[in-house]
């Protein structure tokens, strides 16, 4: 095993790297799996992701939606090249029952433009400053349906966002960090 693979904190990550399923900057595969399992558990159909990057987690969410009978995936990605690459990744998948859109708007603007109680899962992974994530979380709470899930990445480490979730009565999962931050915040709308 080379030095880079040996440095991974988890065998599954080295495997994901070899298979091309993981890319530096994307959410860790184990947290992607948790997110997909939660979406399946609530039988969600409408998902909004803030900060799609290159679309790795977006792809997991869209494939999960497809297995659940289809729905809508709406992303926000402010970097034009990353937005294009997200769309390319998603268009390369077989998603006949999923309507895919990725907006160039900042997450907070995109969230504000959505109808109340129109999503089952909102995943925040864009701007990681606490004040912005708090605003996004407030808007996400509005757009989520009852029983819907507000999730967010990088709740531990340098961004220290766990309080965004715990202050709302949610949880912050502490999992192996690959970079300076990681972990998953989860809150369910009553
Ligand atoms: C950590 S990456 C996201 C990783 C992605 N969710 C994944 O798991 O593969 C953060 C991304 O958010 C984008 N971003 C930063 N601020 C944003 C904002 N306010 N709205 C939307 N996207 C934003 C960045 O351009 C970057 O591509």
Image (spheres, rainbow, N blue to C red):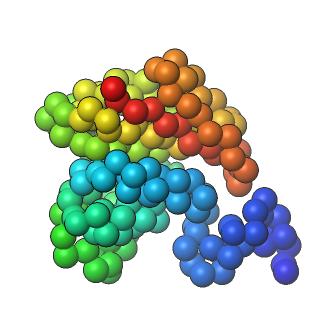
Residue furthest to the top:
167
**Camera-side residue of 59 and 169:** 169
* Quadrant where the C terminus is found in the figure: top left
Residue 34, horizontal then vertical, whole percent: 52, 53
Where, by quadrant of the figure, is residue 45 drawn? bottom left
**Residue 51 visible in this rendered orientation of the protein:** no
Where, by quadrant of the figure, is residue 20 drawn? bottom right
Residue 126, horizontal then vertical, whole percent: 44, 43
Task: Indicate left or right for 182 with 93 as reference.
Answer: right
Task: Indicate left or right for 189 with 133 as reference.
Answer: left
Residue 16, horizontal then vertical, whole percent: 63, 73
**Residue 147 visible in this rendered orientation of the protein:** yes
Residue furthest to the left:
115
Tell me: residue 127, above or below residue 70: above
Residue at the (45%, 32%) spot, across then down: 187
Tell me: residue 11, above or below residue 129: below
Residue 47, horizontal then vertical, whole percent: 29, 50
**Camera-side residue of 42 and 71:** 42
Tell me: residue 66, above or below residue 45: below
Tell me: residue 189, above or below residue 2: above
Q: How many marks?
A: 0
Residue at the (66%, 80%) spot, across then down: 18
**Camera-side residue of 181 and 29:** 29
Residue at the (26%, 32%) spot, across then down: 146
Residue at the (38%, 39%) spot, across then down: 149
* Quadrant where the N terminus is found in the figure: bottom right
């Amino acid at each position: 095993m080379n030095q880079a693979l040996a440095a991974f904190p988890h065998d599954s990550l080295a495997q994901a790297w070899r298979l091309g399923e993981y890319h530096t900057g994307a959410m860790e595969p184990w947290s992607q799996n948790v997110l997909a399992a939660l979406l399946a558990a609530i039988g969600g159909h409408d998902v909004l992701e803030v900060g799609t990057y290159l679309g790795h987690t977006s792809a997991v969410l869209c494939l999960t939606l497809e297995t659940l009978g289809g729905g809508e995936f709406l992303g926000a990605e402010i970097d034009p090249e990353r937005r294009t690459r997200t769309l390319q990744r998603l268009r390369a998948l077989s998603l006949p029952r999923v309507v895919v859109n990725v907006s160039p708007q900042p997450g907070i603007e995109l969230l504000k433009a959505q109808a109340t109680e129109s999503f089952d899962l909102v995943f925040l992974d864009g701007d990681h400053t606490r004040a912005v994530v708090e605003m996004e979380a407030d808007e996400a709470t509005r757009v989520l349906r009852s029983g819907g899930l507000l999730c967010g990445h990088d709740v531990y480490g340098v961004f220290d966002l766990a309080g965004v979730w715990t202050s709302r009565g949610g949880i912050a999962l502490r999992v192996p960090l690959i970079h300076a931050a990681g972990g998953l915040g989860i809150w369910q709308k009553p």
